[in-house]
Image: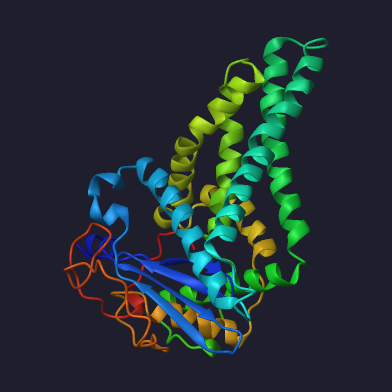
Amino acid sequence: MKKEKKEKKPSYGGQAVMEGVMMQGPQGKAIACRRADGKIVLKITSKPNLRQRYPWLKLPVLRGCVSFGESLVNGMQDLTWSASQAGESEEESLGPKEIAIAVIIALVATVGLFVIFPVWLCTLFYNYMLTVASPETAGFLRSLLEGLLRVSIFLGYILAIRRLPDITRLFAYHGAEHKSIACLEAGDELTPANARKYSKIHMRCGTSFLLMTMILMIVIFTFVGQTSAWYRMLIKLAMMPVVAGLGFELYRLPLYFPKSLIVRILIAPGLWMQRLTTAEPDDEQLEVAIAAMTNVPGIGLTPTVLPEENEPEATDSPKTDDLNEDGSSEEKNGASTIQQEEIV
């Protein structure tokens, strides 16, 4: 009975944005961003995610596909809003046209770097290997090399950008997000001093999810037949939702087996990666993360920063007082009851 009640507790996760943090729960999300004048501004949206509105989307694997797609779309929207708030002047703020162009370029670059380039390069390697090895051996080595190359590009990209001042601050907000969630899960009062004590590394971080998905791609695509380069590219693009769904299920394993040695080994690479994608935040950054967390709809905490009157809460609020993971209503009793399940 006690276990059943725990499973109904809502989950909270987040994402670092430009000069701020987004925190999200079953009933909606809150974004806190610090403007150039030092003031913290908020955007609160009271709207359940797709899995809360359509329970059938909670089926295993499918829920991972939905979560991945929803996070991608919402993440772009949140970054758009935070970029418009973080600009020091109107000229520095990104407009819709500039942001749309940036998103398109990012998507094209992602497909090019992580799908087209590895397949093209490793096909050249495959053609060479056919002259000295059997088709089975050459095919296996091609798939393995594609996966390793994809992970290497990802690591190289992170290492290349992490020293940029803006990225360094973004990674610090990522650390602030993790520390605030850890403080909440431990049942401590959400203050910068308390949150500072916790680790910037979290077992269920989105970085771990991405790396786990890439490793899973190595395993799955090893069994793809010896097809042409373009056909392999199409297969990989078509299979991405399925791979993301399976990666999401692996990513959730620490929830069910937190003390398992096998699970700890599986998530170890992701925890190591977080040392590259997080940085120690200062108290002002922790203050922003806490402001976002305490304003999440339905969380039941006293907000540390209130939204401005001219920035009202978004509509489409759920009719129930609170929603659990299964969509039922239950009152929150405090931070100590929170169970983290979402990408953080």
Percent coordinates x, y for residue 238 in the rendering = 49, 30
Asked if residue 38 is positioned above or below residue 135 in the image, the reply reads below
Compared across the picture, whether 115 is left or right of 319 comes to: right
Q: Where the N terminus falls, by quadrant?
A: bottom left
User: Which quadrant of the figure has residue 36?
Assistant: bottom right
Asked if residue 94 is positioned above or below residue 136 in the image, the reply reads below
Q: Nearer the viewer, residue 200 or 210?
A: 210
What sort of colour scheme is used for the picture? Answer: rainbow
Residue that appears at 58% across and 89% down: 38
Percent coordinates x, y for residue 76 in the rendering = 51, 58
Residue that appears at 53% across and 51% down: 209
Percent coordinates x, y for residue 262 in the rendering = 53, 47
Compared across the picture, whether 280 is left or right of 48 comes to: right
Compared across the picture, whether 160 is left or right of 106 comes to: right
Residue that appears at 41% across and 43% down: 65
Percent coordinates x, y for residue 102 in the rendering = 61, 55
Q: Is residue 22 visible?
A: yes
Q: Nearer the viewer, residue 9 or 50?
A: 50
Q: Nearer the viewer, residue 182 or 244?
A: 244
Q: Is residue 178 visible?
A: no
Compared across the picture, whether 113 is left or right of 61 comes to: right
User: Which quadrant of the figure has residue 13?
Assistant: bottom left
